Image (cartoon, rainbow, N blue to C red):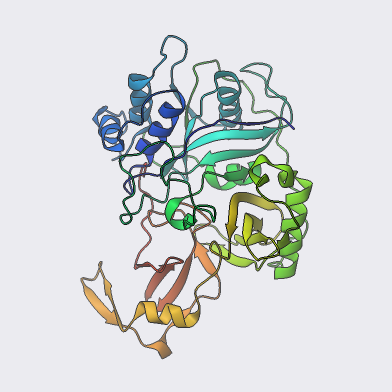
Amino acid sequence: MPRNILPVPYHQQDDPVYCGAACVQMVLNEMGTPLFPQTELFARNNSYPTIDTLQWESSPDGITNTLNVYNPSPETRIFVLYPLTDPDILSKKIVWTIFHYRIAPIVLIYDRQHWIVVTGYDISADPTGPDDTSFTISSLLIHNPRPETPIADDPPPPHFAGDRCGMGDARHNYNPRVYGSPNDEISYTEWIDSYLLQASDGVWSGHYLAVCDPDPLPKLGGKRVLPRRYFDGNKIIEHEAARDCALKEFFESGMVNDSRMKDFSGKLSAGKPNLVQRLDKDDDFYYLVPLVDQNNQTHCLISIDGRYGYMKEARFVSGFEGIYVDPLSPEEILNILGRRLYIESKKRSIPIHRKALCIYPTLVWRPCLESLSPYDPFHMVIVGQYRFYISLVKKVFTVLNVNMNGI
């Protein structure tokens, strides 16, 4: 299958709401511009008078305007915002923009919450023109600018070539949950089901949004390949089944030959799977399965559907021992919670009694301000009427903030 990945430099967002600015920064830099400060790009995004009535951190038309203002070659290519009602047509448009214009589109995901950069694809055949929809899409590759740059250790800003952004692997001895990963691959099924979602409110309600090239749109979305279901979905599959599916999908998809595995030679096995429940969907579960070498160091992390066994997405890493998926122990969770926790909505603290709480049996996740990557789930602790969420880097949240725009 034709596989095309643009050499887009990866940079994290400098603030929890700077995703739009970080995406613009990455795309422009790949086109040859300097690394404009995200504060400047964020201000430009917000200075544009959006047509929407909602409050955006970076609005769709604001991002489009900023790209065109700083565009280093407007005589040959411009950026256009596409609000479409067909996700397949928009996805084919994204592929054409990468194939023909060598530009990485910026796409709105998780309803209207978050901006990412699509840097590449795996498809059945190269498109022959902007209206060609005869090819099928197997997966898309993305740069997710979250997590935001850490405060400690002299991080960016200012950003520069070769900064610590995206250095979350063992070669650099940086935690991926702090320094991000530029190597996320999303199966097309997961892209349609979980990432590319319609805006649910505002002027773009009912539309999927991306900033792409100006060529005419295809009229139809074309064919879509459905994933192979290994199980009937009537129950959550067992850990061993998740391991088997992860290895099978990894090798049969050809990912074992991916250039991002070039630093590895040896035999991979499946490590301990960890089950995660989606809080924003009914009956939706996934396993995070690390593929490890003989030293138990992770080289790829596979997300496997918890009921059917097919691959949802994958993240390529280099040699971290359990850093991605090891959950906290009950004792660690209890120590993190302590004796009292402050509830912001109530403006008071409540006591934590170890004998009167419930640690939820699986990890949980949903897109929210506190985590915009399914690789960063939470432990959920139930204390009476309250829910507490503890990230795997030991941060405690009393609420998951959702329905924010362009963070």
Q: Nearer the viewer, residue 63 or 179?
A: 179
Q: Residue furthest top?
A: 75
Is residue 6 depicted above or below 113 in this figure?
Answer: above
Against 132, is 254 above or below?
below
The residue lying at 66 percent from left, 57 percent from top is 304
Please give left or right for residue 48 compared with residue 86 in the image.
left
**Drawn side of residue 62 relative to residue 355, left or right:** left
Residue 402 percent location from the top left of the image: 38, 53
Residue 85 visible to an observer of this rendering: yes
Foreground pick, 264 / 222: 264
Residue 310: give x, y in percent of width and height. Answer: 71, 53
**Residue 390 on image: x %, y %:** 42, 69
Residue 384 visible somewhere in the drawing: no
Is residue 232 left or right of 113 when viewed as pictured? Answer: right
Up/down of 318 relative to 220, above or below? below
Quadrant of the drawing holding the C terminus: top left
Q: Residue furthest left?
A: 347
User: Image point 54% across, 61% down: which residue?
Assistant: 324
Q: Position of residue 43 (x, y in %)?
A: 25, 33
Taking the image as shown, residue 87 lies to the left or right of residue 31, namely right
Determine which quarter of the picture holds residue 241: bottom right
Front residue of this view, candidates 87 and 294: 294
Residue 381 location, quadrant: bottom left
Q: From the image, which quarter does the N terminus lie in?
A: top right
Residue at 77% from the left image edge and 54% from the top image edge: 248
